[in-house]
Amino acid sequence: MTESKKTPARPTLKAVRGTRDLLPDQTPLWNHVEATARALFARYGFGEIRTPIFETTELFARGVGEETDIVSKEMFTWEDRARAASEKAQSLTLRPESTAGVVRAYIEHKLGETGQLQKLYYIGPQFRRERPQRGRYRQFWQIGAEVIGPQSSGSESPLRDAEILEMLASFLDELGIRDWRLELNSVGSSEDRVRYNAALREALQPVKHLLCEDNQRRAETNPLRVLDSKDEADQDLINALPKIADYLGPESAAHFAQVLAALDACGVPYNLNPRLVRGLDYYTRTTFEFTVTTGLGTQNALLGGGRYDGLSEMLGGPKAPGIGFAIGEDRLILTLQAQAEADAAAAQVSSQNTGENPGAPGPASGTWVNGRPKLDAYITPLGVAQNPAALALARELRAAGLTVEVGDGTFKLRKSFDIADTLARHIILLGEDEVSTNIYTLKTFSTGEQIKLPRTELFKHLAS
RNA sequence: GCGGCUAUAGUUCAGUGGCAGAACGCCGCUCUGUGGCAGCGGAUGUCGUGGGUUCGACCCCCACUAGCCGCCCCA
């Protein structure tokens, strides 16, 4: 009878709902995506900005919009303690998106005073208290960018809209995302939208009672949202509603036409979607979404964005038109993984059909383990007496830029070989002989070849 | 916030109102300076948590929690 069985049950600690750990077999893909974004954005003249992951609640209330779902029911908000009697408690919130914070920083640091067009990008976690499902987490990552500046900097130019869209198309292409679709719309200026909203309400009035419950509610509270409905029975009625395109003022219409012309010139395909309305209040004129059909289930929006010509002023700043986007990094990763799985399945089928075995392609092949490249060498001390020499050798090899793991002198040789073959391309045996003579025994797994090498030759051999 | 499905070994999953299972992985031995293969052996575990029904519950019922899928909404 041991006492271990008597250990009182204790609740297992777990990551909180909607959050998750990314383990080392996942992070290489994340780093690849982020590195691709950084390199690409740099070519377009973007610089990185890092803003706090929490801000005052007021920023999001004013920036994103009090009436939006995000602000009205999805924020992680808490009252910060007042530290002195004279100090008031402050309501703080984990950022549900980053545009508001970036524009706040633009205002706070008077970036508009430089007169320069600001091109800023960010990569980081966002927080929304929603019910988790595929492609939706309470802590999720966005890769986003903003182009903002005084009007004199050209921030209002349709060229900027097209450049952003073209950059996104290049980004998805470079990552190998297939079959993406760009949905594009213009929601007009805020004045245009007031007129359109009135027209929508008028058109909805006689048919409202025919719509589903959700849409009846939207028709009252926010008619634009009716356009977003997926309710099948309502589709015909919705398609018959007035189109925003017919309510754009001449300036908005001209702006949009120039965006389209530039996209055509770049050869970026798009789908005009008059029903694309987005959930954040600050959008004006150009709005867009890139969607995919693989891997995301019903959360098919990979990224979204739009122009926000009035946001800076809404936050008490100078007039600073801008346009930006946010890529759902989690969704991007899901899509890439789903594509890779589909490819692997297709490869399997085709190899069965041809009767050939093309070998396991990609990261599953012999030079990778768990998504990482195999190490250059695994050093096996033969007996604990050789442990110090093994670590010293590892230190030298690592200093020379080689990737090296060291075994433990207590491991049996068989086990050492097993581990080494799993992790590394070569095994270095370090017994008494090797340590005393400085002639090392090196075996290459791919060929089974085993040779003895002096120290300098060892470096050369491993580096090649 | 609402609805559906699910929760058993490290992983993927079977399972029956009466002894807790498979595969893969892991550990050991065959094999103490030469691995991958093979053979043999072993440990896998509060059967998500708490309650109830029952002589007896991993199984049936209830609640909770979490996950997945969808709605709402969004990235």
Image (spheres, grey):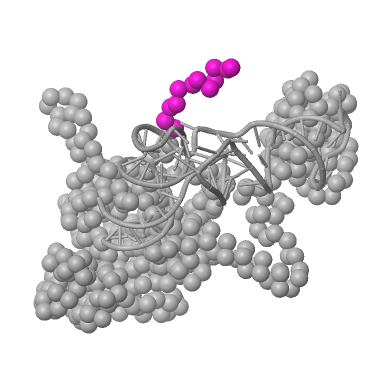
The N terminus of chain A lies in quadrant = top right
Image location (x, y in percent) of residue B40: 79, 38
Would you identify the image quadrant in which residue B72 lies? bottom left
Magenta-tinted stretch: A1-12
Q: Residue at x 43, y 63 (%)?
A: A297
**Left/right of residue A424 with respect to residue A300 in the rendered view:** right
Asked whether the viewer can see residue A376, the reply is no
Image position of A217 with respect to A54: above or below: below
At a point 48% along the width and 66% down the height, the residue shown is A294
Quadrant of residue B73 in the image?
bottom left
Q: Please state if A168 lies on the left or on the right of B13 as rendered.
A: left
Is A4 one of the magenta-colored residues? yes
Q: Is residue A51 magenta?
A: no
Q: Is residue A94 left or right of residue B69?
A: left
Give residue A44's quadrant in the image: bottom left
**Residue A353 visible in the current orientation:** yes
Q: Residue at x 83, y 41 (%)?
A: A443
Q: Position of residue A34 (x, y in %)?
A: 49, 53
Q: Which sits in the foreground, A317 or A341? A: A341
Question: Up-down: is A83 above or below A304?
Answer: above
Residue at the image position 54 percent from the left and 20 percent from the top = A4
Residue B56 in percent (x, y) is at 46, 34
Viewer-proximal residue among A225 and A114: A225
Q: Position of residue A224 (x, y in %)?
A: 20, 69
